[in-house]
Image (tube, helix red, strand yellow):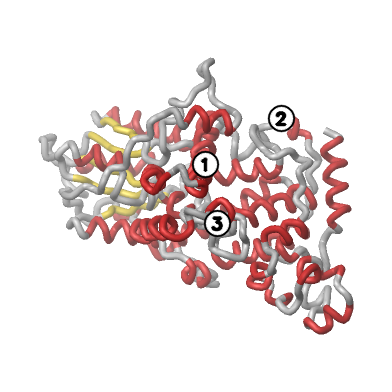
């Protein structure tokens, strides 16, 4: 064990990195640097604390790359990242005690279980004479700042967004120009060192598609932001819905891991000119991310309970066969299957496709939105407690500010409107690539000669629909009316 350091002005301070894996615009790191004391930078993968957020498989793959990038950035400042695996409630106080650190810096978290854990760790630290400095570094504003006239929290995005825009968002800060580090001996807590390779899939290695589509980390995140500002931001209003092209920012995994901060994005868009329609619409999407965090902070049951209590008695179907067909992109509905296959291969799905597949699961199949939320949390590289749950409750109609349940997307019409040339379907459902027009969107209604010419045999080369669209809609409406 490392000998206890003397309590002098040179005793270290600890910066606990969590979902904020960057150096720039890192308020907790900045506050630690301003103490003038040497740093111990640490990351803890906590798989041991009950009820805490568990990283999905795709998020673990992403974490591997994001940690490697952060470690590289710290090494350029002649520092290191101590990476541990175990209970944070044990490891953080132990690290502070062993190194003589009397202050730990971190960013606030939002899930109730995480906040409760932070409180327990702070109590444990205080018993040894150490304190905690917590900053708001993963959102634009402290969620307590935006309140109604009655000092309550907002339940509707439009009203929240109007009040939010009256607030001043702090400017992002640059990465510290100079960092000094406390030398932590390599054997410190050696039994709990994180095996980075354990974050990666092995047998089978299913991450080839993720590797070919993504490069995690702060540097790549900033490049994504710059590219979006140059090429796609102006026409974001329409481009974000076009399934067959890159019209979205693709910043979501960098925001989820904290490789890019929301204040950096906000500031960049404001400097570009927020009055442009594309920029204005994109800022409102950042606002939805903020509203999701805000709602999770004030409504801790968001990830697990329908916030609209009317749906507590909803008669959701239990069908493992239908659920697996949806997960595997084998529903027989081409635009739905395209979205689910894009998710499996790349760890990401187009924004419009997320709405289509979500509506199909919760309405046409009448399967509980929590099943979809769980699958997305495991397979998305941008998985996020707040946004994932908020979006699923929105599309299912069960949230506090959600699309009505009776708004049921017709997949064929969605395909006609947002994939008019069929490029998206052909890319992800290649067995249908020789079909065109309505036959591509609804192969079950195509003529026999069309299918034969395209080499499509329904039930063999491509599945028949697992539900007839009108029947699924009627079943959903019957269940809704029974509430």
- The reply, left or right, for residue 24 in relation to residue 340 is left
Disc on res. 120 = none
Disc 1 target residue: 284
The nearer-to-camera label among 2 and 1 is: 1
Residue beneath disc 2:
309
Q: Mark 1: few, some, or many residues within 10 Å (few <14, many ≥20)?
A: some
Number of residue marks: 3
- Answer with left or right where residue 340 lies relative to residue 193: right
Q: Position of residue 373 (x, y in %)?
A: 63, 48
Category of crowding for the residue at label 2, using alpha-carbon neighbours closer than 10 angstroms: few (below 14), some (14–19), many (at least 20): few
- How many angstroms separate mark 2 from mark 1 (CA)? 27 Å
Location of residue 144 in the rendering, given as x and y in whole percent from the top left corner: 45, 26
Image height check: is 424 above or below 66?
A: below
Viewer can see residue 78: yes
Residue 52 visible in this rendered orientation of the protein: no
**Of 363 and 239, which appears nearest the observer?**
239
Which class describes the residues within 10 Å of circle 3: few (<14), some (14-19), or many (20+)?
many
Residue lying at 51% horizontally and 59% vertically, measured from the top left: 58
Q: Nearer the viewer, mark 1 or mark 3?
A: 1
Q: Secondary structure at mark 2?
A: helix
Q: Earlier in the sequence, mark 2 or mark 1?
A: 1
In the image, residue 250 lies at what x, y percent?
49, 57
Left or right: where does residue 61 sit relative to residue 319?
left
- Which quadrant does the C terminus fall into? top right
User: The residue tagged with tag 1: helix, strand or loop?
Assistant: helix
């Amino acid at each position: 064990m490392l000998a206890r350091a003397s309590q002098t002005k040179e005793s270290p301070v600890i910066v606990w990195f969590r979902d904020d894996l960057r150096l720039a615009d890192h308020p907790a790191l900045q506050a630690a640097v301003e103490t003038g004391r040497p740093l111990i930078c640490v990351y803890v993968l906590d798989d041991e604390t009950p009820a805490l957020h568990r990283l999905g498989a795709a998020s673990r793959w992403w974490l591997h790359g994001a940690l490697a990038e952060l470690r590289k950035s710290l090494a350029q400042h002649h520092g290191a990242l101590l990476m541990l695996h175990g209970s944070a409630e044990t490891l953080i106080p132990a690290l502070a005690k062993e190194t003589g650190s009397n202050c730990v810096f971190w960013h606030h978290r939002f899930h109730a279980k995480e906040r409760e854990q932070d409180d327990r760790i702070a109590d444990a630290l205080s018993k040894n004479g150490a304190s905690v400095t917590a900053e708001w570094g993963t959102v634009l504003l402290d969620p307590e700042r935006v309140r109604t006239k009655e000092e309550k929290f907002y339940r509707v995005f439009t009203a929240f967004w109007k009040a939010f825009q009256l607030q001043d968002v702090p400017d992002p800060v640059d990465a510290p120009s100079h960092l000094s580090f406390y030398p932590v001996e390599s054997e410190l807590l050696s039994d709990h060192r994180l095996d980075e390779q354990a974050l990666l899939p092995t047998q089978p290695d299913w991450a080839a598609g993720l590797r070919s589509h993504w490069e995690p980390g702060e540097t790549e995140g900033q490049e994504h932001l710059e590219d979006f500002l140059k090429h796609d931001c102006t026409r974001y209003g329409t481009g974000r819905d076009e399934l067959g092209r890159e019209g979205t920012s693709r910043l979501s995994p960098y925001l989820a891991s904290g490789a890019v901060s929301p204040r950096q994005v906000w500031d960049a868009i404001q400097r570009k000119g927020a009055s442009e329609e594309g920029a204005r619409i994109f800022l409102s999407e950042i606002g939805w991310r903020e509203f999701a965090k805000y709602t999770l902070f004030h409504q801790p049951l968001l990830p697990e309970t329908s916030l609209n209590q009317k749906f507590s008695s909803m008669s959701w179907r239990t069908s493992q066969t239908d659920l697996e067909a949806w997960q595997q992109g084998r529903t027989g509905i081409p635009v739905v299957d395209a979205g689910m296959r894009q998710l499996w291969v790349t760890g990401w799905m187009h924004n419009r496709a997320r709405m289509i597949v979500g509506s199909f699961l919760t309405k046409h199949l009448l399967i509980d939105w929590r099943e979809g939320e769980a699958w997305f949390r495991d397979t998305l590289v941008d998985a996020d407690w707040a946004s994932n749950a908020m979006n699923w409750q929105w599309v299912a109609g069960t949230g506090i500010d959600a699309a009505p349940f009776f708004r049921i997307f017709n997949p064929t019409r969605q395909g006609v409107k947002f994939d008019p040339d069929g490029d998206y379907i052909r890319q992800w459902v290649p067995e249908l690539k020789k079909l065109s027009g309505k036959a591509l969107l609804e192969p079950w209604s195509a003529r026999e000669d069309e299918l034969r010419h395209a080499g499509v045999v329904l039930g063999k080369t491509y599945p028949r629909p697992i539900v007839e669209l009108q029947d699924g809609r009627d079943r959903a409406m019957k269940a809704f009316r029974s509430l």
